[in-house]
């Protein structure tokens, strides 16, 4: 069984010049935790996640460890400022992806080793889908139950 047999092809995407507000709305309304970032040719250029957005609000480790007092409750105000930042400034640019012809268990191994829950699927550099560890598990389960 290959990734192309189980991947989702209806993938929500954003571009690097969109505002974080756009992906935040998508995350809340569509119950997703991130999205691939593509260019005008649907080439994968990054990925943006809730972690990337929230990390932008947090102080750096050396700031937290200093004698400076941080009002963590008040940090929520930084979220509003973060909404007007371009996705390209916060996205992860060094993105792992897999080809659609990769065996499912190889995809699961890559996700396991990299501690990912999902990974973009590309073909010739273009985004064609996304596969999650749950997709692999469901496919293997169905295969075992029907054999």
Image (spheres, rainbow, N blue to C red):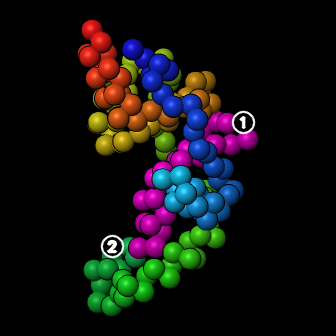
Which residue lies at the image location 31% right of the left edge and 16% below the top edge?
Answer: 143
Which residue lies at the image location 33% right of the left edge and 40% below the top edge?
Answer: 114
- Residue 109 among those drawn in magenta: no
- Label 2 SS: helix
Q: Residue 4 location in percent, x, y?
A: 50, 20
Instruction: Name the quadrant containing residue 136.
Output: top left
In this figure, which residue is indicated by the disc labeled 1?
Answer: 41
Height in image: 22 above or below 116?
below
Query: How many angstroms separate mark 1 from mark 2 (CA)?
Result: 38 Å
Q: Which residues are magenta?
A: 32-58
Residues tagged 1 and 2 counted as in contact (Cβ below 8 A): no
- Label 1 SS: loop
Quarter of the image with the N terminus is top left
Q: Residue 20 location in percent, x, y?
A: 60, 63
In this figure, which residue is indicated by the disc labeled 2?
Answer: 61
Tag in front: 1 or 2: 1
In the rendered structure, which disc, 1 or 2, sits on the residue that comes first in sequence?
1
Instruction: Name the quadrant containing residue 86.
Output: bottom right
Mark 1: few/some/many CA within 10 Å (<14, 14-19, 20+): few
Horizontally, residue 58 falls left or right of residue 128, namely left
Any part of residue 90 in sight: no
Question: Disc count in the image?
Answer: 2
């Amino acid at each position: 069984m290959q990734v192309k047999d189980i991947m989702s092809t209806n993938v929500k995407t954003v571009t690097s010049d969109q505002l974080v507000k756009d992906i935040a709305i998508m995350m809340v309304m569509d119950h997703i935790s991130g999205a691939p970032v593509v260019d005008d040719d649907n080439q994968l250029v990054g990925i943006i996640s809730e972690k990337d957005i929230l990390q932008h609000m947090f102080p750096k480790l050396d700031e937290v460890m200093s004698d400076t007092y941080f009002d963590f409750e008040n940090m929520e105000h930084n979220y509003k400022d973060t909404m007007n930042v371009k996705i390209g400034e916060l996205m992860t640019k060094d993105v792992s992806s897999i080809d659609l012809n990769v065996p499912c268990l190889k995809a699961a191994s890559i996700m396991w080793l990299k501690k990912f829950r999902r990974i973009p699927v590309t073909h010739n550099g273009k985004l064609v889908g996304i596969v999650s560890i749950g997709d692999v598990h469901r496919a293997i389960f169905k295969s075992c139950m029907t054999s």
